[in-house]
Image: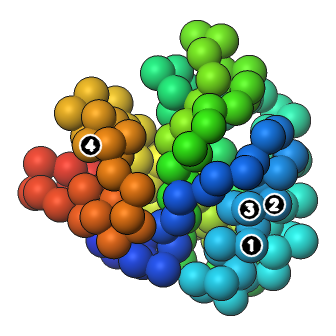
Amino acid sequence: MNLSTLLQPSAVKVATALTSKKRLFHALGDLAHAAYGLDAAIAVSALQEREALGPTGVGNGVALPHARIDDLTCVRGVFLRLEKPIDFTAVDRQPVDLVFGLFAPENSGVDHLKALALVSRTLRDPGVCAKLRANADPSILHAILTEGPAIQAA
């Protein structure tokens, strides 16, 4: 598994006017709908339900919201780079500006966990995060996220 199988170029965007976690989840749902045909309302609801279990802000300005959805056949990702960081109740209490959302089939089991681990490892790399923060072109952001054999899951 690698990020190029999880993340289509059309699922990467720079967001300019998001001011809350709720609006962020709606933007992720809209992006998942546009890129993969997911029902945006179902995606948003699933993200909110998962977030209610505990925040998915992992620190250093990164959040990994994720959810399981019945009608999916494979794990899909969406990525937003926020021009202005927002409060996300992250573990380090820092605002978030890099958001990778994952949507997995309800019965995906280990594939969901592998995808989450892959994204987590990728966005723990300070060099990757610096490149993402330095670019505003979605195609470049996609290339940064999907480049390199060093960013692969087992």
Are the residues flagged by discs 2 and 3 in contact, CB closer than 8 Å? yes
Nearer-N-terminus badge (2/4): 2
Q: Residue at x 53, y 58 (%)?
A: 14
> What residue is drawn where x is 75% and y is 48%?
18
From the top left corner, tell me how far across and down residue 73 is, in percent: 59, 83
| Discs 1, 2 touching: Cβ within 8 Å | yes
Disc marking residue 142: none
Residue position for label 4: 131
What amino acid is found at the position of numbered circle 4 in the picture?
Answer: Lys
In the image, is residue 64 above or below residue 67? Answer: above
Please give the residue where the numbered disc 1 appears in the rendered image.
Answer: 30
Q: Residue furthest left?
A: 149
Asked whether the beta carbons under mark 3 and mark 4 sit within 8 Å of each other, the answer is no
Check disc 2 and give the amino acid type: His
Any mark on residue 26, and which?
Answer: 2
Residue 45 horizontal/vertical position (percent): 89, 59
Query: On the image, numbered disc 3 is attached to which residue?
Result: 27
- Find the distance from the CA under tag 1 to the CA under tag 3: 5 Å
Q: Is residue 10 above or below residue 146?
A: below
Give how far apart the Cα atoms at labels 4 and 1 are: 25 Å
Q: Quote the CA–CA distance across marks 3 and 4.
A: 22 Å
Disc 1 element: helix
How far is disc 1 from disc 2 in space, using C-alphas? 6 Å
Q: Amino acid at mark 1?
A: Asp
Rendered image coloring scheme: rainbow
The secondary structure type at the circle numbered 2 is helix
